[in-house]
Image: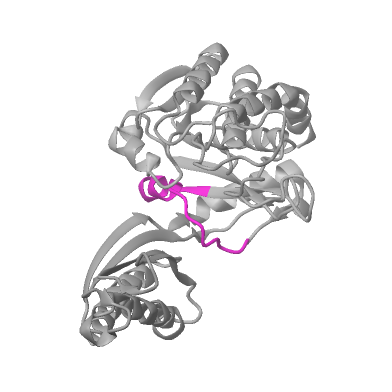
Amino acid sequence: MTEVLERSRALAEEFIALRRDIHAEPELGFLEHRTSALVAERLRWYGYEVHEGLGGTGIVGVLKRGNGGKRLGIRADMDALPIVEATGLAYASRRTGVMHACGHDGHTAMLLAAARQIAEKADFSGTLNLIFQPAEEGQGGAVKMIEDGLFDQHPCDAVFAMHNAPGFPQGQLLFRHGAAMASSDYAKITLTGVGGHAAFPHRATDPVVAAASIVMALQTIVSRNVDPLMTSVVTVGTLHAGTVSNIIPGVATLELSIRSLDRDVRNLLEERIKALVTAQAASFGVQAHIQYERRYSVLVNTQAETDFARRVGVELVGADQVVMDAQPVTGSEDFAFMLEKVPGCYLLVGNGEGSGPGSTMCHHPAYNFNDENIAVGSAYWVLLTERYLSA
């Protein structure tokens, strides 16, 4: 769809500058006050009805045209990460220890660029809800917006969102129906034994030995309890115990990240982790306390909405730039909670491959959003709006 892309490219520099401004002033989840105010100001300027305060710093911009009854939602996330930036860019973060290391600055800029074009040019009949969400990075901002009445106040028949994808060609669009991103759960295991002198281990009950055995045993859950065709991950991310080499500590703690692409497998993982840890700890004579938290759900794209999103992608950039059935991702996204309430699709846009711009993985101190995607991403949202809310 050359016309839409040309229009987006003509406006790109303005929104690249906006993206870099947001990048230089990153804000952590639920603290996106400057970003939220900027978004609200822009939306009002473009003629949207602006609703603030959903999920704390969340924003919804509403644009109604004609007498069409369909209601479309498009989401962008706004929060940054607690990372010290190492890009050396002229517009690098001015806030020490906070960085846009996942491209949410780009997602926000793309949707604002689309918002302007839609308000000025788009031909549609219905209701468009542009959702700017806080706190996607592990804090459940989507849940907070929903709890604050997002879909009660702004009903949607379908919702869509887009995330950049380092490692794929810039501007390539990737789609998948069904389970597209994994659930993400957390477990903290506290092992309590009896401390003592390292020279007299028989007079102690060593939680470190128990922890070491548990780390290895946990790996058998994926390899021996889960169907080999069902993707799942159990990662021990931290193991803390002791202070010096000649003291057996009384306590050891482990923290786990648990991921799955299937809801039944997710239940199985919780069941097996709890059973295995309890049994292993007992075998070493230590006590185990397990804190288990279910965090992000499996992100499931619905078939009809994904098929529609694919068609829009092909129309915009051509079939050779669209991956129709991309591999699922074991990362997680709280857009999953929105998809539990409303049908929709979460798609990816390539951020760059090889050693080129945008190829550094998200959550890395050297990551940077590829500004070439401002035009592609905004054009996609414009075209999707026109096709979904066709006059």
Residue 330 lies within the magenta run: yes
Q: Position of residue 218 (x, y in %)?
A: 39, 78
**Residue 170 sits inside the magenta stretch:** no
Which residue is at a point 75% across and 24% down the rendered structure image? 13
- Name the foreground residue: 374 vs 115: 374
In terms of depth relative to the viewer, which is nearer, 218 or 204? Answer: 204
Q: Is residue 196 above or below residue 26?
A: below
Where does residue 210 sit, x and y in percent of width and height?
Answer: 32, 80
Q: Is residue 220 above or below residue 155?
A: below
Position in image of residue 133 (x %, y %):
45, 34
- Residue at the image point whose x is 40% and y is 76% from the top: 215
> Which quarter of the figure is the N terminus placed in?
top right
Query: Toward which corner of the image does residue 203 lie, by quadrant?
Result: bottom left
* Residue 30 screen position, x and y as percent: 39, 33
Q: Is residue 122 visible?
A: no
- Residue at image point 32% right, 74% down: 273
Image position of 20 (left or right of 390): right
Write down the quadrant of residue 42 in the picture: top right
Residue at image point 32% right, 58% down: 294
Q: How is the image coloured?
A: one colour
- Point out the stretch of residues depicted in magenta: 326-345
Residue 257 in the figure: left or right of residue 356: left
Residue 40 visible in the shown view: yes
> In the figure, is residue 316 to the left or right of 178?
right
Q: Quadrant of the C terminus?
A: top right
Q: Quadrant of residue 192?
A: bottom left
**Along the line of sight, the residue nearer the viewer: 214 or 117:** 214
Q: How many marks?
A: 0
In this orientation, which residue lies closer to the viewer: 186 or 381? 186
